[in-house]
Image: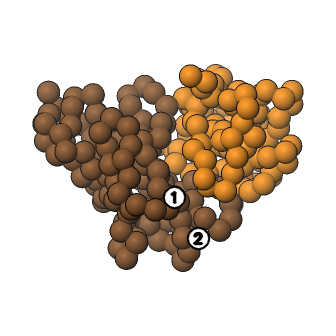
Chain colours: A brown, B orange
Amino acid sequence: AQSVSQHNHHVILSEAASLELGCNYSYGGTVNLFWYVQYPGQHLQLLLKYFSGDPLVKGIKGFEAEFIKSKFSFNLRKPSVQWSDTAEYFCAVTPKAAGNKLTFGGGTRVLVKP
Amino acid sequence: EPEVTQTPSHQVTQMGQEVILRCVPISNHLYFYWYRQILGQKVEFLVSFYNNEISEKSEIFDDQFSVERPDGSNFTLKIRSTKLEDSAMYFCASSPSAGGLYEQYFGPGTRLTVT
């Protein structure tokens, strides 16, 4: 069975700082990878996804993530955060071979101070 | 933009009671899912549903749980006899297709409190 771990539970940073959230997964086969975001009071929304091809993927709102197969990692980055990036961020995977259930990491709460 | 909707937003029930959580998936989607998140824990997959039958379910989804698409638009999760440990946020999701290639669109969730 697959599992996903996110390194940080809470991150606090100031506006304009750079953000990097770690995500590692464990699975014996190939996976599709996702980052979801949940803004306060809102539902989970897709930030970006990786299925194949260029391991550096760009998502909405200036976010990007890099898939490093050898490290089983899919870290999320944003060069300069804004107060509106305050949210909880979830990394998730689905196995390519079969099934479509998402396995989520524990989430990282990001607070951006103005 | 089409959205997944869920009702109610908050449900309080007593232990042993039956609850039905309701979801309206995006209209042209074919796959439907329920996930839950117990406070302080990870979002966990419960069940996926396609073509009027369960396509996959987790160990959590035992005989106390059932899903149904009663009328072509709603997608419901029923818990027959609630337990304290069923208290959680329940998320419905839908996707146009399966195989992990398609984004799952999530609803806002129903917070279930079992007392």
Amino acid type shown at disc 2: Ala
Q: Is residue B49 above or below residue B72?
A: below
The chain under label 2 reads A
Q: Quadrant of residue A96?
A: bottom right
Evaluate whether residue A12 shows in this view.
yes
C-alpha distance separating marks 1 and 2:
19 Å
Q: Residue at x 54, y 70 (%)?
A: A30
Q: Which residue is mark 1?
A: A51
Query: Which circle's residue, 1 or 2, is located before the other in the chain?
Result: 2
Which quadrant of the figure contains the N terminus of chain A?
bottom right
Q: Residue at x 52, y 48 (%)?
A: B43
Amino acid type shown at disc 1: Phe
- Outermost front residue: A53
Q: How many marks?
A: 2
Q: Nearer the viewer, mark 1 or mark 2?
A: 1
Residue A3: % across, % down: 49, 65
The chain under label 1 reads A
Q: Which residue is mark 2?
A: A1
Per the image, label 2 sits on a secondary structure element best described as loop
Evaluate whether residue B65 shows in this view.
no
Q: Are marks 1 and 2 in contact (CB under 8 Å)?
A: no
